[in-house]
Amino acid sequence: MPLTEFSPNVARLEASATLVLAARARKLRAAGVPVVDLSAGEPQYPAPPFAARAGIRAVEEGKTGYPPTSGLPELREAIARYLCETTAEEAVDPGAVIVSAGVKQSLFNCCYALFGAGDEVLVPSPFWPSYTTIVRLAGAAPVIVETTWDGGFVPTVEDLEAARTAQTRGLMLNSPGNPTGAVIPPDLLREIMAWAERHGIWVLSDEIYRRLAYAAPAPSVFDIAERGERTILLDGVSKAFCMPGFRIGYAVGPQEVVRKMADLQGQTTSGAVGPSQHAAAAALGESAPRETFVDDLLSRLAELRGTGLSRFAEIDGIEAFPPDGALYFYARIGGGARSLDVAERLLADVQVACMPGEPFGSPGHLRFNFAVEPEVLEEGLERIAGFFG
Ligand code: PMP
Ligand code: GLU
């Protein structure tokens, strides 16, 4: 007999599948099971030492009071400079930047501020599971726009137009995307932004994997001159700077939206952790060490991507989509098996933890994080080959 009925706010809320699976793999490892954990999307490497030191120094120097709700001025300035240095945008006002506890919180605040009952938000599929959940938490309805393997897992304007109704208020973009690694090429992004502008649709562009692109640089919405005013860029330090535990993300958009997000944050979390903000300011602040760090990470990931793709090509029964960005192999499995069951069996039989496609809206697939040590990936692929072989 349950203790209570939950409020309608959360009655249908589900736990984050990615985090649940990662926690399960961690628990098994702690119990001595030799799990190869390729589940959570997380670079399993240390943060830049210069960023970590800045966080430690902040604590040691007693910079432990409440930070400003929207973020430390030096971090908002560093973000504005970073965007000017790495996109075509020439001037970003630090006042248009809000810092939150990860992109996840920025995204929640943004959706909660902009969308509500009766609104529809287009979400290209496969999608990161939190998008649909967060849109629902805001009271709005996610509308799935299917993309295909053969179409490179990117939505076309025709796909979006077919899903548009009078209620469409927003579009989630994620390029490079989780879980597929697909990159929306510049011309298509330009067309999508112009389409959204024409219809007064808010574009929430989650660019957390933007710097992790293998074939060609992944364009930002800030590279697109045709973008409308209803554009919000979201990014953070969890992926390209290997700092997920610092919980720092940000959104950049029109000041009135950013101010409302700050009010929401001021009534819920009082903003992001102060010492983490000092660390993030150091990570982004100086271009030379920052770019060296990203370059090194990218070469490391490119190597792992290459090894993994050639290994997958030798395994029957599973086929990996060649990702142009991000840090995942998204693979389809033949035979009509449920990917949830296959993921369970991979864990039970050969102790490899991965993500099934179902939470991403695409059954029949498995997602593997390849941002691990080379020997971990090799061991994982060996076991995957044994399982499917
Ligand atoms: N967006 C995407 C597409 C992601 O894969 C993730 C997962 N980390 C996030 C946002 C959340 O990132 P953060 O750690 O900044 O909350
Ligand atoms: N985003 C990562 C993933 O897709 C980390 C977990 C999460 O934040 O959902 O696995």
Image (spheres, rainbow, N blue to C red):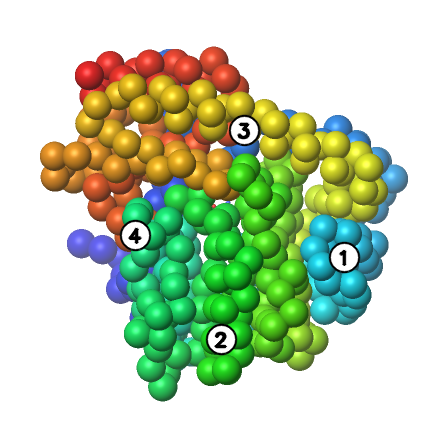
Reading the chain from its start, which is encountered first: label 3 or label 4?
Answer: 4
Marks 1 and 4 in Cβ contact (< 8 Å): no
Q: Give how far across and how far down residue 204 sits, in percent.
A: 52, 65
Which residue is the site of mark 4? Answer: 148
Crowdedness near tag 4: few (<14), some (14–19) or many (≥20) residues, C-alpha within 10 Å: few
Reading the chain from its start, which is encountered first: label 1 or label 2?
Answer: 1
Q: Is residue 80 left or right of residue 130?
A: right
Residue furthest out toward the bottom:
166
Q: Name the one closer to the observer, 266 or 232.
A: 232
- Label 4 C-beta lies within 8 Å of the nearest ligand 1 atom: no
Which residue is the site of mark 3? Answer: 302
Distance between mark 3 and mark 4 Cα atoms: 24 Å
Distance between mark 3 and mark 2 Cα atoms: 33 Å
Q: Mark number for residue 196?
A: 2
Distance between mark 1 and mark 2 Cα atoms: 23 Å
Distance between mark 1 and mark 3 Cα atoms: 26 Å
Crowdedness near tag 2: few (<14), some (14–19) or many (≥20) residues, C-alpha within 10 Å: many
Residue furthest out toward the right:
61
Query: In what quadrant of the picture does the N terminus appear?
Result: bottom left
Mark 2 falls on what kind of element? helix
Mark 3 falls on what kind of element? helix
Name the residue type under label 2.
Answer: Ala
Query: In what quadrant of the picture does the C terminus appear?
Result: top left
Residue at 16 percent of width and 39 percent of height:
338
Reading the chain from its start, which is encountered first: label 3 or label 2?
Answer: 2
Name the residue type under label 1.
Answer: Cys
Residue at 54 percent of width and 29 percent of height:
302
- Label 1 C-beta lies within 8 Å of the nearest ligand 1 atom: no
Name the residue type under label 3.
Answer: Ala
Q: Is residue 168 left or right of residue 103?
A: left
Which residue is the site of mark 1? Answer: 84
Q: Give how far across and how far down residue 187 sits, in percent.
A: 52, 61
